[in-house]
Amino acid sequence: MGIHQADGERIKQEEERIRENGQATLQGPGKSKIHLLSIIGEIEGHENLSGSTKTTKYEHILPELAKVEDTNEIEGVLVLINTVGGDVSCGLALAEMLASLSKPTVSLVIGDSHSIGVPLAVSTDYSFIVPSGTMLVHPVRMSGMLIGTSKTYEYFEMIQDRILSFVSGHSRVSYDRLKELMHNTKMLSKDLGTVLVGGKAVEEGLIDEIGGIQDALQKLYDMIERK
């Protein structure tokens, strides 16, 4: 296989990878190699969503992140987020995986980071949000047919505590303040919770800084260089 043919095959594989799971490898001239991860649409969990729903499949991302950790070629991870939330268990698993990486990580909320998207946004070493980006903090939802016993509610309280503990442990917002935002009754007319737009997410301590893709990439390159 010639050089040009090999390059063409590599480009084709990269394009297919982006289409399939929203992941790619970035490397500017003379710069470090970065793994790009996109968390888009709804986070799909243990059950498949409809074919018309834009989803992020966590079973695709987990092995990719394991490969990133295991290779010396990739030096950092950039996470782009625009999600309405999704499966709580799987979203939290992704957040824990990102938080456990030894390599520098930066997240950028480019649109929405709702529900379980909040732990994902704060799971990295540093976080950005665009001025128009939004974060929705709300209690854990109950859906489907449930047995209405005290044990059921204790179980959901435990899940909620896991989320509160993770987010407060990976950001500048306290556990109690986050719980207060989660149970806010004054903002949403038919629901509990708080919507934070751009700078408000920074003010509350969820996100580190307002910025865009240029800021996020530069921050990541700086972190890699310092390491």
Image (spheres, rainbow, N blue to C red):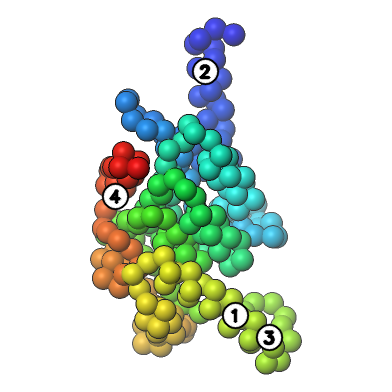
Q: Where is residue 117 in the image (x, y as percent from the top left)?
A: 47, 63
Cα gap from disc 4 to disc 2, whole angstroms:
31 Å
Q: Which residue is denoted by mark 2 in the rendering?
A: 8
* Label number found at residue 189: none
Q: Name the residue under label 4.
A: 212
| The image quarter in which residue 82 lies | bottom left
Residue drawn at the location 51% of the way across and 66% of the way down: 116
CA separation, marks 1 and 2? Answer: 50 Å
**Residue carrying label 3:** 152
Query: Quick one: label 2 or label 3, which is nearer the N terminus?
Result: 2
Q: What residue would you read off at disc 1?
A: 158
Q: Which of marks 3 and 1 is in front?
A: 1
Label 1 neighbour load within 10 Å: few <14, some 14-19, many 20+: few
> Are the residues at dot 4 and dot 3 in contact (C-beta closer than 8 Å)?
no
Is there CB contact under 8 Å for labels 2 and 3? no
Can you tell which of label 4 and label 3 is closer to the viewer?
Answer: 3
- Mark 2 or 3: in front is 3
Q: Is residue 188 visible?
A: no
Q: Is residue 78 above or below residue 47?
A: above
Give the image quarter of residue 187: bottom left
**What amino acid is found at the position of numbered circle 1 in the picture?**
Met
The local crowd at label 3, few if under 14, some if 14 to 19, many if 20 or more residues have their Cα within 10 Å, is few
Query: What element does badge 4 sit on?
Result: loop
Q: In this view, does 5 lie to the left or right of 137?
A: right
Query: Callout 3: helix, strand or loop?
Result: helix
Looking at the image, which is closer to me, 153 or 71?
71
Precedes in sequence: disc 4 or disc 2: 2
Q: In which quarter of the image is the C terminus?
A: top left
Q: Is mark 1 on a helix, strand or loop?
A: helix
Q: Residues within 10 Å of mark 2 (few under 14, many from 20)?
A: few
